Image (cartoon, rainbow, N blue to C red):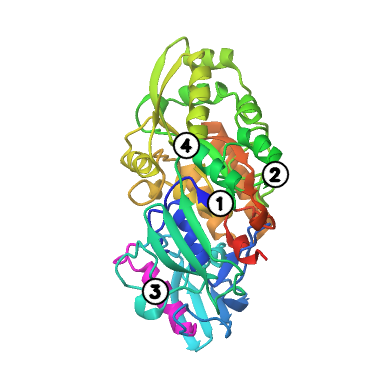
Amino acid sequence: MVVSSDAETLDPRFVTDATGLRISRLVHAGLMRLDPDTGAPVPYLARGVTTSPDGLTVTFQLREDVYFHSGAPLTARDVVATIHALRDPRLASRHARVLGAIAGALDTDPHTVVVTLSRPHATTLTDLEVPVLRADQVYDAPDLGGTLDGLGPYRVVTRARGSVELAPADRGALPRPAHAVRVRSLRDENARALRLLTGSSDVAINALSPALLPSLEAQGLRVASRPGLSVNYVVMRLDRGPFASLAARQALDASIDRESIVKHLLSGRAQIARGLLSPSHWAAAGGEPPAAFDLARARALLGGAHLRATLLCGTDRLRVDVARSIAQDAAGAGLDLEIVPLELGALLARLAAGDFDAATLQLPELVEPNTLRVFLHSTSIPPQGSNRGRVRDQALDELLDDGEATGDRSRRAAIYAKLEARIRQQAFVLPLWHEDQIAVTGPRAAGFQTSAEGRWLGLAALP
């Protein structure tokens, strides 16, 4: 497999980048996993799940046929130790906030775990997709190289700069895969395409510009795509700078020609966003169409003024091209955007520090709408979370709180419809489009099936 960026870490407790996250989910497994089509939580290490009538107690019956890569059997003690450690502020895991509603976890027998909640929490099953570690390793030092014992279908053999070697695991959470996997990172898109064309690599998932796909198909490679659950959007710093003004945010929104970018830069392999949630998501509101491309309206919103701002983006050629297209049109409205391409680590560091005016980003796995809490709630402003725009809005906070606490799906959908309307009204972020999940494969991986959330467990099912 070829990817565009190297994994920053393979430690499932601390991973945040997309490549590292997806590799970690090949090596590790949780009580639940995400259905590849709907994104709904389904049992994984659990063989059964029971929730009490009040929703405050969840009992998991563990599978008895799953073993760590070391040969140690999975036990309830491992699950309880993992939950306690991930919630412990001393560990500083990225999952601490996700598991914040859990009051405690007990192993009532070697294969039963009882989780109690401190408050009603709609996303508990999705949250417990977090990987389970061996009880004696949960507090180990950060493990960049992937040596922590895992329960997934693969184990890490070696990790070097730009390459991760994975071998099939015998008694993990999935049947033993037929093939070993090498994940090779290449920043140059032409190099990734060339490896596929020469047969040196077998699969690339969301790693090639859509404009290249017709020529790759013409030369015998298989291109498979499906609508995805990701969203591309513009985040702006709202507490200072040019986009503290609602009119400026609305002007930028009106100056983005989404239809043209999707047609010409994405080759039509995306859906223009009506909101942050993909149209196929159960909580998607449908709602009004996105702001029309209207430079006259954008100029009117600015009152004839000219604003200067920076627009951060990734270094991938497609992301730079998208940013340049946005800047070119925005200039016609009086918005002069300076494009600043940055490697992912530097980009995220600047966003966390607030050293930006606007940035183009992708939220690759918007499966559970409660994820938006991390990006929009006023208690999630860095370093507490990823509210990089510094959004502070009481009405938005209340909707996010209600969505987290409400269990009934239809009621939750109504709450998130109001949330999307509030985001649109105030232009807190600017949803752009939902890109398709695209897999380019050679003959050896021709049977690979893409998933809606973009993960790679389909590799384990290749014949």
Q: Earlier in the sequence, mark 3 or mark 4?
A: 3
Residue occupying the point 60% across, 23% down: 257
Q: State which quadrant residue 209 falls in.
A: top right
Residue occupying the point 46% across, 70% down: 102
Amino acid type for the residue under numbered disc 4:
Asp
Residue occupying the point 51% across, 21% down: 251
- The image quadrant where one finds the N terminus is bottom right
Q: Which mark identifies residue 84?
A: 3
Q: Earlier in the sequence, mark 1 or mark 2?
A: 1
Q: Which secondary structure class fits the magenta region best?
A: helix
Q: Earlier in the sequence, mark 4 or mark 2?
A: 2
Which residue carries the number 4 mark?
A: 316
SS type, badge 2: loop
Q: Earlier in the sequence, mark 3 or mark 2?
A: 3
Which residue carries the number 2 mark?
A: 220
- Give the camera-side residue of 261 and 275: 261
> Which residue reaches farthest bottom?
109
Observer able to see residue 226: no
The magenta segment is 73-92
- Contact? badges 3 and 2 (CB < 8 Å): no
Is residue 89 in the magenta section? Answer: yes
Q: State which quadrant residue 296 falls in.
A: top right
Above or below, comparing residue 391 to residue 449 in the picture:
above
| Residue 175 x %, y % | 62, 74
